[in-house]
Amino acid sequence: MASFLVAGCALFASACGSSETSNGGDSSPKSGQSCPMHEAINDRPLIIATTVAPITSIAANIATGTPTIVQGIVPEGTNSHTYEPPPSVAATLEEADIVFINGLSLEEPTKEMARANAREGSVICELATTILPEDQWIYDFSFPKDGGKPNPHVWTNPQLAGDFAALIRDSLVSADPENATTYNKNYEAFVLKVDALDKAIVASTATLAPEQRKLLTYHDAYAYFARTYGWTVIGAIQPSSFEEPTPREIAELIDQVKQEGVTAIFGSEVFPSSVLEQIGKESAVRYVDVLRDDDLLGAPGDPEHSWLGLMRFDYVTMVEALGGDASALKSLDVSDVGPDTADYPQ
């Protein structure tokens, strides 16, 4: 069996159980070494830097209506696992009071640059590392435990993204208490949207029989989603080395797709995969090549250019391609809490 492919929950136990995390409620994750709180700043606007676009979007929702400046770092459409920040990013990090990163070893070069260029008193907040206990980290075919890096795609699980929002709110309130009322109000409005998304995913998932809820994707981005919502990730084309699979591994994948009885496999709009297209043709299943894991829809300023819009798009795509009814998801309001003034590098 290919090293990057694991069949079913029996061998993929770390990503197929029920989640113990909260659903973005008002119970804030605890700050600590992975996310120290910044001392209050009273004489100027707060400046924050963020890494991948979903985190930028969540932070922008919490900060909207305040003078806080939100500056994204990782350009959309970039492979965040291999992203090396150019020297120009150092200037952004030098100005930032708080640098929000996903953590779980996703953005190590950016974290090191932030440490090297930090302004006095600034802090780095690793969101996923803080909100997710180590015994809930997922290791799998693309992120093997012996490689030392867990699967970092926590934001594709709305419940955990709600915890991101709570931690971001706490961090902003600590650093900018003058605008605490607005941060809290924005969080309360945002978490209502997260809860609605959560309920819509549950309702849409229920329209699929358990044996239909199987994901073969280009990139291994939905393990935390699958664990919470009762889906099974049967494999990912992109292995831990981020290279293309071998012909033998492709043949094994084709055999597994046939054995698993999946009706659709999913590629990435940002990173097209001729391998997945080949697997779809040779196993006679539908190949859907539009999923995105950290690249938001449209361009900055567009109505659905948001974490909420991204999640609705991905899960509508999955449910409908596998034969389910995504009307609960389609009816969601995915507008931001307020105007998104963050800078998203393109």
Image: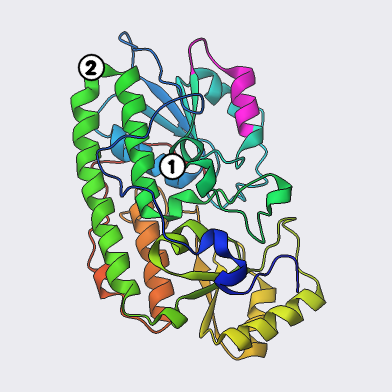
Question: Mark 1 sits on what residue?
Answer: 55
Residue 191 in the image: state x and y as whole percent. Answer: 25, 46
Q: Residue 333 location in percent, x, y? A: 22, 58
Give the amino acid type for the residue marked by disc 2 in the picture: Glu
Quarter holding the N terminus is bottom right
Whether residue 161 sits left or right of residue 292 in the image: it is: left
Query: Going 42% across and 52% down the picture, which residue do you hit?
Result: 299
Mark 2 surroundings: few (<14), some (14-19) or many (≥20) residues within 10 A = some
Residue 238 picture quarter:
bottom right
Residue at label 2? 178
- Work out whether 107 lies above or below 10: above
Q: What stretch is highlighted in magenta?
A: 110-122
Residue 204 falls left or right of residue 50? left
Is residue 118 a member of the stretch shown in magenta?
yes
Query: Which amino acid type is marked by label 1?
Result: Ile
Query: In the rendered picture of this protein, how many numbered marks are placed on residues?
Result: 2
Residue at the image point whose x is 55% and y is 44% from the top:
75
Image coordinates of residue 222 in percent, x first then y, are: 50, 61
